[in-house]
Image: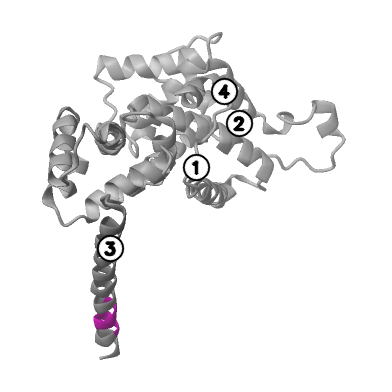
Amino acid sequence: MKHFLRMLIQVCLYFYCKFLWRCLKFVMRKLTGRCELQRICYSTKPGASRTMKIESSLRDSKSKLLQTSVSVHPDAIEKTIEDIMELKKINPDINPQLGISLQACLLQIVGYRNLIADVEKLRREPYDSDNPQHEEMLLKLWQFLKPNTPLESRISKQWCEIGFQGDDPKTDFRGMGLLGLYNLQYFAEKDATAAQQVLSDSLHPKFSKLSKAEWEKKRMDKSIGYSFAIVGINITDLTYNLLVSGALKTHFYNIAPEAPTLSHFQQTFCYLMHEFHKFWIEEDPEDIMEFNPVREKFRKRIIKQLQNPDMALCPHFAASEGLINM
């Protein structure tokens, strides 16, 4: 009975707050002569703050047109904005900036949804050793990370040198499918120097901050390395979940003037891979069994950063320089 009453009170409060909000919107419209979309566009600076408010306003609207506008095809955005302006009785000649602002917001909103679909498609596609394209990507990953060391054979213990678990990497891609390979290759290709340095540090973390002589003076060496490729797949999973949960909206809406793309996602992976590596060294875990707690601590730190509406994950290497300048 108590549970039922609690639920009843929550439902009543929900509808009461919703009613009050609609009343407030009506009053504001009468006082300012502007609809909610106009007020947001004219009073909020471009970026995540504006786009997320517009997205929320459209989704919570009682108008079917506004509700569905967040999921239209990119080619239909211009027509959708015209329909919204007509519905709201807004003269585009008197309010030209509104259409421009709405278009920018909708491109980001629709683009984010499409990016999730693109990323999900890659994640669901399994690695196929009979697919020449898949095999070529895997071999290129080796070449980018170990340019001076030839791979003796496709099935080889050498794969462990770049952080795979066995002599055939295909089994390690099961969790993230092709997405894990795409991200690792992107990092290794677009910023070979940084990727090779992270790989080297993951194998020899105790020498990444101090000289060998300084470490030999220590009584106890507890600096622990990790498997580069496996951690890369794990960070791919982290980046994927940040995307799907919507946490990355803050970042993408602040750095992509239009629709965020797969390249933006891969650049974000590069940044997180780089930052996690530094975080791991700083945490100085006792052994590899502490990986999950360290990863969770890192995840919480990134989420906290992304809760700032002005946040844009700032890259520190060439693979992501485009994020700053867009």
| Of the image marks 1 and 4, the number of the one nearer the N terminus | 1
The secondary structure making up most of the magenta span is helix
Residue 317 bears which disc, if any? 4
Real-space CA distance between mark 4 and mark 3, rounded to the nearest whole angstrom: 50 Å
Mark 4 or mark 2, whichever is nearer to me? 4
On the image, which quarter does residue 201 sit in?
top right
| Of the image marks 4 and 3, the number of the one nearer the N terminus | 3
Q: Are marks 2 and 3 in contact (CB under 8 Å)?
A: no
Residue at 43 percent of width and 35 percent of height = 254
On the image, which quarter does residue 288 sit in?
top right
What secondary structure is marked by label 3?
helix
Give yes or no for residue 140 being in the magenta stretch: no
Q: Label 3 crowding class (10 Å Cα cut-off): few <14, some 14-19, many 20+? A: few
Residue at 26 percent of width and 58 percent of height = 30
Mark 2 or mark 3, whichever is nearer to me? 3
Q: Amino acid at mark 3?
A: Val
Q: Is residue 123 left or right of residue 311?
A: left
Q: Position of residue 11 (x, y in %)?
A: 24, 76
| Of the image marks 2 and 3, the number of the one nearer the N terminus | 3
